[in-house]
Image (cartoon, rainbow, N blue to C red):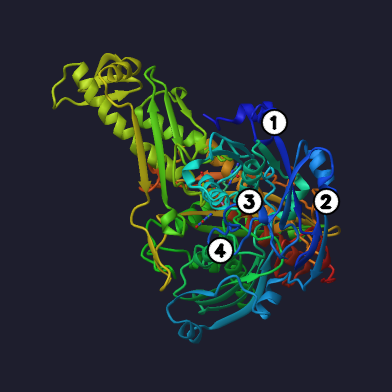
Amino acid sequence: MKNFDAINHIKGKSIYIDDFVLPQNALFASVFFSPIAHGKIISFNLEKAKSIDGVVAILSSKDIPGENQIGGIIQDEVLLAENEVHFIGESIFVVVAKSLEIARKSKKLIEIEFEELPAIINEREAFAKNSLLAPPVIFANGNIEEGFSESDFIIEGSFSSGGQEHLYLETQGAFSIPQEGERIKIISSTQNPSAVQKQASKVLGISMNKIEVEVLRLGGGFGGKEDQATPWAVISALAARITNSPVKLVLSRQEDLLVTGKRHPYSSDFKIGLNKDGKILAYEVTYFQNGGAVADLSTAVLERTLFHATNSYFIPNVKATGISCKTNLPPNTAFRGFGGPQGMFVIEFAIEQAANKIGIPKHEIQKKNLLKDGDELHYGQIVENSNSESCWQKAEIQFNIENQIREIKRFNSENQLYKKGFSFMPICFGISFTSTFLNQANSLIHIYHDGSVSISTAAVEMGQGVNAKIAIAAAKTFSINIERIRIETTNTSRNANTSPTAASSGADMNANATILAAKEILARLIESARTELNANPTDLIEIIDEIVFVNHEKTNLTWEKLIWRTYFNRINLSAHGFYATPNIHFDRKTNKGKPFAYHVYGTAFTIAKIDVLRGISKIESVQIVHDFGKSLNPEIDLGQVEGALVQGIGWVTMEELQYSENGKLLANSLSTYKIPDIYSSPDKTEVVFLDNSENRFGPLSSKAIGEPPFMYGIGAFFAIKNAIENAKQEKSKINSSPITNEKILLELYNERK
Ligand code: MTE
Ligand code: LUZ
Ligand code: MOS
């Protein structure tokens, strides 16, 4: 059993937004973006642009029938700029034409005059100018002053981590088709169909029930389509409404790179206190997040940074402050890990700095402070079923790490041109949306009277295999062959009020809702079988592998016969399941509660090798013990670990987002932005399943997998840094990620930038 889409992906047969066969009267939209990062619109003239043959309309904010407001959390984001622009790539006009070529040609003739205003690019500068997206947020426990006064060692420092482009293979896009009356259908490449529906309803000024959002699949999302698929879908709907024609809007790769938000760059200050035994007593940290020009999901991302400030460690006294800074960059957004990686990176760096100062290996401090059951996290949640230590210990034994470390030392003593380094990277990631209300999902099951099954849920397939997981959960619940099950598209007319497929909880919550719906139908089927077989009320009736059993005895009533008889007897073969994650809550006044259903744990051991002459790094091996719970599908889950790991390694070793002084992304093509490929992935990746892991919150005891393994990639940064230190025989001053080859070379030869 693999990802359902695997074969068609390989054959090139899977359909994405740009592949839908268009009706004959379809039009094409192209957006005119702000070329400056900050300024006032003084005047514009669209006449020349309109005069081109084949241009049907050029829309501006004045053409919006409803509200021009699409901010999800904070109402600070317009669909089309009115009088001011705040980042390069802000949408101003929409050209709608008979072909994309015509629309693009027309766009070049738009005349517009700005009065440029100063632009802020950097988060520290924004903070200094009090340019914030929201007030600072503090998560704290214990008593930080006492913690530091009891400490034998106190280490202070700063650390910054860079942004990251999602680089989903399918760029942002949507296609809208006007229907009868006011109704409109939007086919979107979004992780969040209900958000598209809601924002389109606001912008068009019609109720949500007149808008149908349909999602077949995404060519990748990685968080980049949690919030930022919405504007394109809404623009295409607006254009479709105004021209009364189907309208397609798909961004080119370069447009997508330039105008969409990315992982948030962070810059942070920390202070960590430890006692002589290496116990961490106090940790104070302030995160400056580069949020971009509007809030988007930044405040939620920042909150997850605060939740994951202490990674997999218990620290009794913590004060973590998060500051979401408003800059003139495209709004940064959700990206796998959702602020968690940025938070965890700083504590890992702080521990490394402490180890250097105290003169003991970093991993001794890490190991000594791992979470145990009963520990209270700084946000009030009590640790239960911690697998923090068991993953670490299993890694030590299974991978024979002591030997490997000895081998690395031997290698380094015998080689001058190459040096090796290693790191441990434990992870602890909370599963649940941190906004409690989002933790709900629903599933609609129909069994057709031929015995085939149709399932619609809120989950969006974006390559992560959620469809296969939902089908597995249903097949196991009914005890039928998975071939009988079809997972339908995600559609707001079938599943309402859905949360985005995000926070790694898409499979968890939608499979749980599916199991509930399936159990409801199953209960009816069991009674139907009882009637059919004239069994007694006390007889045990079961369906096992598509056959009905009575008191453990096989009968000749098959699934297909049973379904037909149930239908014939006018019993409902459909059900709607609703799942809300139980017992979670979080109080935003005190910043305490139990926000997460559970945590996912694991440990990665990474070995890096650097070429001392050229500064080139290579990740030799990453060996991971990961806590999968009882995996619904080991192949898909392994794929998720490997993919996330390489994405994480890319973030910390080579992906570098550089902006010009005036806020233009310089790395705006794949020739200037380097992402990991097969050559830069580890020579060896070994993933071991932690055994005996249970999870009563996951479907069939599984655990969420989508985001947590991303954080293993952080280990690559520290392994490379360790290799540099082994080469130089002194501690490295590098305190920013990514650790590119260029940076390694300069550091080796003390030519710091
Ligand atoms: N895997 C693939 N192939 N493509 C993706 O876009 N997104 C990741 C992860 N794995 C993604 C992926 C992110 S950011 C999340 S939150 C989860 O998948 C979402 O899916 P899930 O909740 O079903 O795990
Ligand atoms: N999205 C969100 C997320 O809205 N809330 C979250 O907590 C979250 N976590 C991870 C990824 N996306
Ligand atoms: Mo994932 S960042 O929650 O879409």
Q: Give the vertical position of 202 relative to 549 (above or below).
A: below
Distance between the Cα atoms at labels 3 and 4?
14 Å
Residue located beneath label 3 in the image: 231
Question: Is any part of residue 400 visible from this angle?
Answer: no
Residue 582 is situated, as x and y percent measured from the top left of the image, at: 34, 53
Which of the image's four quarters has the C terminus? bottom right
Q: Give the vertical position of 717 relative to 286 (above or below).
A: above
SS at circle 1: loop
Residue 403 is situated, as x and y percent measured from the top left of the image, at: 61, 54
Q: Marks 1 and 2: in contact by CB < 8 Å?
A: no
> Which is in the foreground here, disc 1 or disc 3?
1
Residue located beneath label 4 in the image: 75
Residue 377 is situated, as x and y percent measured from the top left of the image, at: 43, 67
> What amino acid does circle 1 point to?
Asn
> What amino acid does circle 4 point to?
Gln
Q: Marks 1 and 4: in contact by CB < 8 Å?
A: no
Q: Earlier in the sequence, mark 1 or mark 3?
A: 1
Q: Earlier in the sequence, mark 4 or mark 1?
A: 1
Question: Is any part of residue 591 visible from this angle?
Answer: yes
SS at circle 4: loop
Q: Earlier in the sequence, mark 2 or mark 1?
A: 1
> Which is in the foreground here, disc 4 or disc 2?
2
Q: Is residue 33 left or right of residue 52?
A: left
Residue 182 sits in which quadrant?
A: top right
Q: Give the vertical position of 690 relative to 68 (above or below).
A: above
Q: Is residue 259 left or right of residue 348?
A: right
> What amino acid does circle 2 point to?
Glu
Distance between the Cα atoms at labels 2 and 3?
25 Å
Front-most of residues 707 and 232: 232
Residue located beneath label 2 in the image: 47
